Image (cartoon, grey):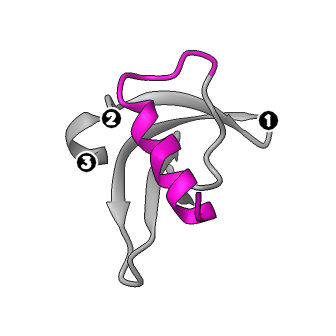
Amino acid sequence: MLEDHLTVPFTVDVLGAQVIVDRVDLTPDDRIVAVCRRGKMRQRISIFELPLPDSPPAGWEWIEAYRRFLRGR
């Protein structure tokens, strides 16, 4: 659902640095991660830990739904 509904790319602030979320991906152990870049560097960040951007992109509600699922609510 995230791949279909989340509008990417978008920018978020991670530990004081702006990064661009290019896409979401599934890890071999079935975790959903955001594939982020800053310049030539790339990093995968758990969707659960991804900070809310100042202007959330369309589809952000699917990230919130996944977070609630992980918390067991």
Residue 50 in view, yes or no: yes
Residue type pointed to by label 2: Leu
Left or right, residue 21 beside residue 14: left
Q: How far apart are marks 3 and 2 (CA)?
A: 8 Å
Count of numbered labels shown in the rendering: 3
The picture places residue 73, in percent across and down from the top left corner, at 59, 57
Q: Nearer the viewer, residue 53 or 39?
A: 53
Q: Position of residue 31 (x, y in %)?
A: 45, 71
Q: Residue furthest front?
A: 73
Left or right, 70 with respect to 35, comes to right
Magenta stretch, residue numbers: 54-73
Find residue 3 and name its label: none
Q: How far apart are marks 3 and 1 (CA)?
A: 29 Å
Residue 27 image-quadrant placement: bottom left
Residue carrying label 3: 1
Q: Is mark 2 on a helix, strand or loop?
A: loop
Q: How crowded is mark 3: few (under 14 residues within 10 Å), some or many (20 or more)?
A: few
Q: Mark 2 points at which residue?
A: 6
Q: Position of residue 18 (x, y in %)?
A: 65, 31
